[in-house]
Each structure stands twice: as structure tokens, then as C-alpha cells.
Amino acid sequence: MNLELNSIGIDKKPSDTKVIVAMSGGVDSSTVAGLMKMQGYNVTGITLKLYNDSKEVVKSKVCCSGQDVIDAKRVAHKLDIDHKILYYQDKFKQGVIDNFVESYLKGETPIPCVQCNQTVKFKDLYEVAKDLNADALITGHYVKNITINEKNNMYRAVDENRDQSYFLFNTTREQLNYLRFPLGGMLKNETREIAKKLNLNVADKPDSQDICFVPNGDYSSVIKKFKPDSLKKGNIKNLNGEVIGVHDGIINFTIGQRKGIKVADKEAL
């Protein structure tokens, strides 16, 4: 006879339900770990070390930095839960950074957070959670999920200002059935209040704003680091093939961009 479904839609008692919480070191994932612990689940936190910090990155508002790893470890200690650190620098470079660089060289505008979720987080971390015999992988994304007949469906978060469903659009059915998003029905200020009640060291920590491996939003410096010959000048031509200007490197521009090209609209026609 099946038990009543627990708060994450699994027919087990919370104490018999093993969950892996992806802990980035920020307030959202830390609060999720705290909620799972409060509700009596068997919780293990996992933090991914995705890149080697530079001085610029440490000073920037990013996620998954060295300080974030330390913060996640402190939260796990405070909550008295198991905690593991996975060193995924090589996987992250191959799955995310290399793709980011190649996309910019083609004049595209990549979204590395989507690529990270698709590869490192919801592929590699998913496999690790399965290997640990966990019943679910929990994250701090603001996405609402409803489980019906063992199928987990994804919806926009209640807090539309924080909704992150867009970044998870390519999540597979298999992954989605295994994932849980406890913050989908909460507002951001409610998350912080819970963190404060739990006396977590990250309760007032600012949200990450920059791409984690891009210090201070300087995309071209990252691309130049991995592709030193990418900053080559070239001609700007109109539709008739006439040269109307010179650019300082294609990586500084994306398709449809006008700002910074230094070519008057009438000359570009």
C-alpha cells in the first residue's frame, strides 16, 4: 500500500527520502537545503567548483566562485548535513566556456547559464545524484513544479520577477521527473526571511548578477584569453559590398548590433 506523497511528491516518509541539494553558496540554494532539513529529509549538499578564480572574478557578483564554495560548506555545517565538493573545472570548460567562445566568434550571443544547466548541472550532477541512490535532485531555481502520477511538470514561478523557467527550457523529461524546485511557490523576500530564521551566514548575501567566468561583464577579455588571435580588425561593408568602416574585432559585436559600431545609419543603408 502506497504512503501519502511527501512534500516533493514521492510516496515515502521524508526520513526515508534521500535528496541531493545543489548548493551554489547563495541564499536560494542554501535556504532550500535548510527547508529540506527542517522537513526531515535525508539531505546531502553538493557544490560544484566550476572554474579557477581570478582576482577580477572574486570581486565580481558571480556564482560558483571560491568564496561561494566556502559559504556552502559553512551552511552545510550549520544545518548539520553531509556536503560534497565536485571539482568540475575541466567539464565546465569543455561544456560551457568553449561553447561560449566559439559562439561569440561566429557573431552569436550565447546564454552560458542555459548551457551550464543542460550539461554540467542537469547532466553530470544528475548522474552523480543517481549514483548516490538519491530519490531527487533539488535546486534553488525559481521554477514551479507539480508532480502528478509520477510526472513532474514545470511552470513559471509565483515570483515572476525571479522566474527562471526560461533557463531550464531544454531540461529533458527524464531530468524533470527527478528534479524538484521548492522555491517556485515563494517570493524572494520570503526566501531571505527563512534564511534569517535559520541563521544562515548567506541570508543577506547579494544575488549573483554576472556570468560566473566573465569578470565584470567583460566578454571580450575572456575570449581573448582563450583565443588570443580573435581581436583582429576587419572591414564593415553595406549590402552593396562597399566598405563603410573598420571594426576592432568581430567578438565585440553581435548580430543586429548598432551601438559601438561607429558607422552612421545613413552610411549603413
Image (cartoon, rainbow, N blue to C red):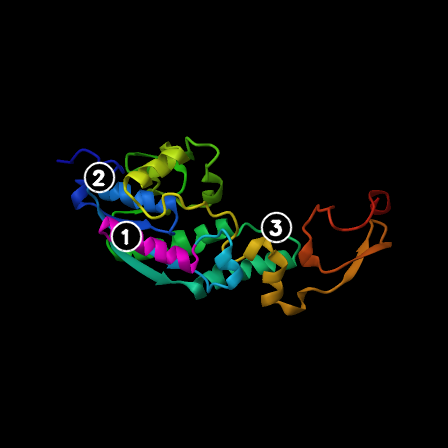
Q: Is residue 80 magenta?
A: yes
* SS under mark 1: helix
**In which image quadrant can residue 67 be found?**
bottom left
Residue 8, label in figure:
none
Q: Residue at x 39, y 48 (%)?
A: 26
Residue 132 falls in which quadrant of the image? bottom left
Residue 138 visible: no
The magenta segment is: 64-81
Reading the image, the residue beneath label 2 is 39
Q: Is residue 131 above or below residue 175?
A: below
- Between circles 1 and 2, the one closer to the viewer is 1
Most extreme residue toward the left is 1
Return the residue nearer the eye: 47 or 256.
47
Disc 1 residue type (three-letter): Ala
Element carrying mark 3: loop
Of tags 3 and 2, the one toward the viewer is 2
The residue pinned by badge 1 equals 76
**Would residue 235 be counted in the magenta stretch?**
no
Q: What percent of the width, then of the height, locates residue 191?
A: 36, 37
Kind of element beneath mark 2? loop
Q: Of label 3 and label 2, which has the lower sequence position?
A: 2
Q: CA distance from mark 3 to mark 1?
A: 36 Å
Expressed as whole percent of the image width and height from the top left, the position of residue 107 reads: 66, 54
Q: Which of 122 and 34 lies nearest the eye of the viewer?
A: 34
